[in-house]
Image (spheres, rainbow, N blue to C red):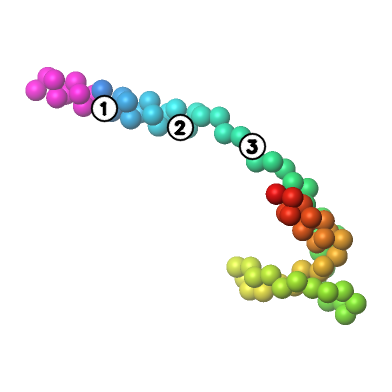
Amino acid sequence: MKSAQTWGIAAFLALLIDRISQAVRLRPWPVFNPAQIRRYEGATRELRLDMPYYPAQTARGYVLIPRDGYFQQTEEVLEQL
């Protein structure tokens, strides 16, 4: 009976050490990509007829993203990945 209790404690400690080592393990930070962030001043709710738009689906429904310089730069960055 003493042997089973010792094995149980050893298994518990091994599991505890494994969980702590997973929590403490160093993970690389995600690479910051400036194309992922757009300033609020650039966002607009007005649609212009002189600019093409790209339809994109979000959780709230469809939105239209203007195909402007920002959009082209983002496409170029994503193509390089």
In the displayed structure image, the side of residue 81 where residue 46 appears, left or right: right
Mark 1 or mark 3, earlier in chain: 1
Residue position marked by numbered label 3 in the rendering:
29
Instruction: Look at 72% across and 73% down and name the residue there.
Output: 55
Q: Main secondary structure of the magenta part?
A: helix
Locate the N terminus by quadrant.
Answer: top left
Q: Secondary structure at mark 1?
A: helix
Residue type, label 1: Ala
- In the picture shown, does residue 46 fall above or below 27? below
- Residue 56: x and y in percent read 69, 70
**From this viewpoint, which residue is outermost toward the left?**
1
Viewer-proximal residue, 74 or 11? Answer: 74
Among the 4 quarters of the image, the one containing residue 52? bottom right
Viewer-proximal residue, 55 or 9? Answer: 55
- Residue 77: x and y in percent read 77, 52
- In the picture shown, does residue 19 fall above or below 47? above
Instruction: Look at 74% across and 50% down and name the residue there.
Output: 80
Q: Residues within 10 Å of mark 3 (few under 14, many from 20)?
A: few
Mark 2 or mark 3, earlier in chain: 2
**From this viewpoint, which residue is outermost toward the right?**
50
Q: Secondary structure at mark 2?
A: helix
